[in-house]
Amino acid sequence: DKFVGFVDNLEKIGKNIELAHVSYQDAYKQLYVGKDNLVKQTEKLKHLGIKNKKNLPQSLIDESESLIND
């Protein structure tokens, strides 16, 4: 009975990991993918003159642009 309970719990963990991964992928797409991704929108606002105290890391901007061009 303990072993069956353990296997059930392990399967639940696996399903939750899969759900977390899908959620991560969806958030990643919003951040990086497509011409209106969040990184790109932030850069557009910056070019329009919106002032902010902090800047996105250049590597994040570069990755976003490379995914748009692919």
Image (cartoon, helix red, strand yellow):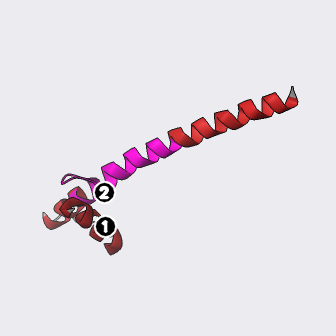
Percent of width and height locating residue 9: 72, 33
Which image quarter holds the C terminus?
A: bottom left
Residue 26: in magenta span: yes
Describe residue 37's horizontal placement relative to residue 59 as left or right. Answer: left
Q: Residues within 10 Å of mark 1 (few under 14, many from 20)?
A: few
- Could you say which is closer to the camera, residue 55 or residue 27? 27
Residue at the far top: name it.
Answer: 1
Can you identify the residue that label 1 sits on? 63
Q: Quadrant of residue 69?
A: bottom left
Q: Which residues are magenta?
A: 20-40
Looking at the rendered structure, the kind of residue marked 1 is Glu
Can you identify the residue that label 2 sits on? 32
Describe residue 44's horizontal placement relative to residue 59 as left or right. Answer: left
Specify whether residue 62 is in view: yes
* Residue at (79, 34) in percent of width and height: 6
Q: Quadrant of residue 31?
A: bottom left
* Residue at (25, 66) in percent of width and height: 66
Residue at the far left: name it.
Answer: 48
